[in-house]
Amino acid sequence: MLEFLWRPIRTSPLNTKKVQSELDDDDGSIDDSFPSRPTPSPFLPETMLRPRLRVPRLAFGLGMRPMVNARRSIHHVPELPHDYSEGVPNLMSPGGFSLAWTQYMKLMVEKLNALTVGTELEDKDTKTIALMTAREPNQAPIFNYASMAHNNHFFFQGISPTGTPMPDALRSDLEASFSSIETLRREFIITASAMFGPGFLWLVKAGPGDYRLLPTYLAGSPYPGAHWRAQSTDMNTLGKDGSARNFINNQAYGANKRSGDLPPGGIELEPLLCLNTWEHAWLLDWGVGAGGQGGKVAFAESWWELIDWEKVAQKSGVLRPDFKSA
């Protein structure tokens, strides 16, 4: 049988005379040598004055390691091939361009740098970052900023102040896929107008002579490597067993549907051109389009006139015989 021994803890006796003496000497004044709590600012909530415990970010699911120089900001707003300081002719005013490009890209870069500084993604380009984080749910913020920055840059790279003529080889290919260039133009404008929400509308090449339109919502990516992050379907228009499902599937893969049920963004394709349908790209200059005046439709019509078809042809491979689909 175990015996529990209780032993009293010995403590030093309280010097009551010393305590009483200190109390008698206290005149109620405040000791200025002791730092007091700062006076709350009338412009800031009191909670903002409280010290915050900085918790280091968790390691990335990609197995990324912290880098030595964690203060460097490697991503910058890229330069465009044309000077739009006076706006994009017949498309964006100087203020509209500043909002859609200068301010917005600066924000995307700042957010991306804040999330990737000190990691292995720090020195990667935006497309690579989007592809590397597309299948990592815990890296959704990084994907969104990287993909959005890449998509917006892609949009501005596809236009020029006056547009360029369409090369004959590209025209022949597009007419084979859409019956006519006018049909392609109309499909671009109608589809962009029907997109109920911000995103991008892409002209993609899914194989030799196989061109299609692909909508992506929000920061969705058209690249096959982005896997499920294409966000190419507006679920508000697609019922569980509705007739729209077959239409969407056929639209995604076309007449030459590949075998296997590939995920959104998993088809073989090469993005060639995109139209930005985010409100910040057109709302300032074109308005909401009430009464059939201006709006996204008018913006898309003006954008069509500024397309740099030479660049589209280069991306499609019709100007170089060594093209291989993604």
Image (cartoon, rainbow, N blue to C red):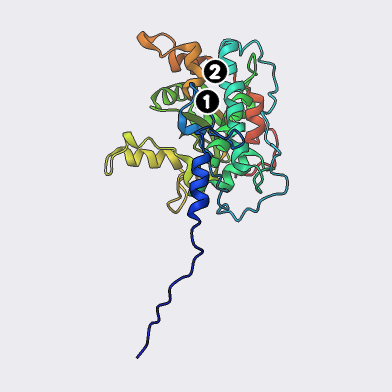
Mark 1 Cα shell of 10 Å, populated few (<14), some (14-19), many (≥20): many
Farthest residue, direction left? 241
Q: Amino acid at mark 1?
A: Leu
Left or right placement of residue 186 versus residue 316 in this view: left
Mark 2 element type: helix
Locate residue 101, reporting x and y percent.
60, 22
Locate residue 87, reporting x and y percent.
62, 12
Farthest residue, direction bottom? 1
Nearest the eye: 181 or 59: 59
Res 170 visible: yes
Locate residue 247, reporting x and y percent.
35, 38
> Residue drawn at (48%, 58%), measured in percent from left and top?
14
Left or right placement of residue 164 versus residue 201 in this view: right
Among the two numbered marks 1 and 2 on one chain, the one whose residue lies closer to the N terminus: 1
> Residue drawn at (44%, 10%), measured in percent from left and top?
294
Q: Quadrant of the N terminus?
A: bottom left
Nearest the eye: 320 or 140: 140
Query: Does residue 276 sit above or below 291 in this rendering?
Result: below
Res 167 visible: no
Locate residue 311, reporting x and y percent.
66, 27
Q: Quadrant of residue 142?
A: top right
Q: Quadrant of the C terminus?
A: top right
Query: Does residue 228 sit above or below 287 in this rendering?
Result: below
Mark 1 element type: strand
Q: Amino acid at mark 2?
A: Trp
Read off the residue under disc 2. Answer: 303
Q: Mark 1–mark 2 contact, CB under 8 Å? A: yes
Nearest the eye: 90 or 218: 218
Q: Between marks 1 and 2, how big is the CA–CA gap? A: 8 Å
Read off the residue under disc 1. Answer: 275
